[in-house]
Amino acid sequence: MPTPLQSSSELDPPTAGPDSLPAPGAAGAGEELRFARTLVNGFLGNVPYCVYFKNRQGQFIALSQSMAVLFRAKDVKEIEGRTDFDYFSEAHARSALEDEQRIMKTGKPVIGKLEKETWPDGRVTWALTSKLPLRDAKGEIIGTFGLSKDMTREVANKAALESARRDLMDASRVAGMAEVATDVLHSVGTVLSSLNVSASVIAMRLHHFKTNSLAKLSALLDEHKGDLAEFLTNDPRGRRVVEFLESLARHYQEEHSHLLHEITLLQKDVDQIKETVAMQQAYAATAGVVEPFDPVGLMEDSLRMNLGARDRNEVSIVREFQAVPQIMAERRKVLQIVANLILNARHALHTRNAGDRVIRIRIEKGAEGRVRITVQDNGAGISRENLVRIFQHGFTTKAHGHGFGLHTSILAAREMGGTLTAQSDGPGAGAAFTLELPAAVAAAA
């Protein structure tokens, strides 16, 4: 490993540079040499980029005025004879010296290298640098030269832009999840409404239950318990006791049947809410985990979570599931994408009558090593101009939508190495959204 270089006072005079070239013998050559020096000095004195020439020991032998400004030197003479170790941190100077030695050894240049420069005072700058071998008239390598452009502002702007992009992506993902959660809560709310109806019916029927009549009959029989046989045989009220008991039995049987039916509906609603909450919790626990899973099971979970009992009664779900390998992806993200597609299909069906609403779901093998999931509806359709904008952030055709769902979905699909596309023949012709993701076998290979 080379060591930091000695100062210029301990070295021989530079072996190259505009002022160290040997004087030619002919007067014409001398004029050409002076003209060449004028060109070089004019270039180095005015070029906006940092240009430098170094000898084999890594000392500056010539450089541009812009570089003296960067180094905060009075003029270029103050820098000549010095090395990077006099101006940069040990790590950066060592890296630059290794580059130069490699260039002088191999003759191969370094083009367009983005370098992080750390200065002794703690400043950090960035430069786009190209370094090349410096050769004499015989073609022998006598040092290096290079050109660098200050990229500090560009790097900072790029970092800020990337940070803003990540923040926007995170915000879109959160907003998309919130939109899905809102629709899931809407479905749960629909189930709760149904549950409330069943509870109200049960309460009303219990309120009108003929318990008072049974109490009155019991009191009447107790009043005639000493002559019960005579009362039931000869008294007009007693002769109607049997008829009343038969009527009361029929009433209780009917009420029992109605109450049992409502309680069954109520239990189903409670079970659906419990199942939806449990599935949400289960999928939330897999956040960030890439694993193989069955796409059919995930699709069935999504249908149960995002289509309530009322929706399932009004919408025909056509399943076209082929035998496919498992998907290798983040289960929660795929669920979010599929949920968006199902909810969008459900919204699109509002233009159709209740008996004519169809969602067709296909799971099939896609391109080699991929699985394709398609959610197709026969609803409102998508116009040609909207079809090219449907995945843009903030674009929506819903009256109260935010335009986050599909944008978040296509970003999530890309993050998992998949694709998400839309197809529609126009308004009224329905729409199909196709998600393709890597199969577990292909991902493992």
Image (tube, grey):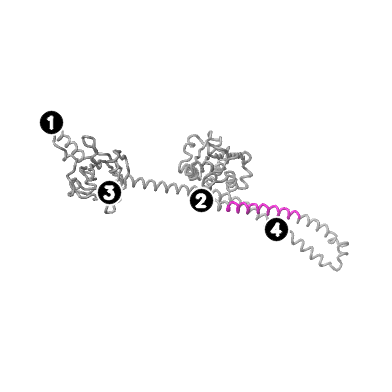
- Which is nearer the eye, 161 or 33? 33
Amino acid of disc 3: Pro
Residue 387's spot in the image, x, y percent?
49, 36
Verify whether residue 257 appears in magenta.
Answer: yes
- Mark pair 4, 1: CA separation: 122 Å
- Which is nearer the eye, 13 or 120? 13
The magenta region covers 253-278
Residue on which the image places disc 1 = 28
* Mark before the other along the chain sequence, 1 or 2: 1
Amino acid of disc 4: Leu
The quadrant in which residue 150 appears is: top left
Callout 4 touching callout 2 (CB < 8 Å): no
Residue on which the image places disc 3 = 2
Determine whether 312 is above or below 216 in the image.
above
Amino acid of disc 2: Ala
Residue on which the image places disc 4 = 206
The label nearer to you, 4 versus 2, is: 2
The label nearer to you, 3 versus 2, is: 3
Residue 287 shows which numbered tag?
A: 2
Residue 358's spot in the image, x, y percent?
60, 39
SS label for mark 4: helix
The quadrant in which residue 242 appears is: bottom right
Dot 1, crowdedness within 10 Å: few (<14), some or many (≥20)? few
The label nearer to you, 4 versus 1, is: 1
* Mark before the other along the chain sequence, 4 or 1: 1
Q: Please, what is the dominant secondary structure of the magenta stretch?
A: helix
- Mark pair 3, 2: CA separation: 50 Å
Determine whether 309 is above or below 212 in the image.
above
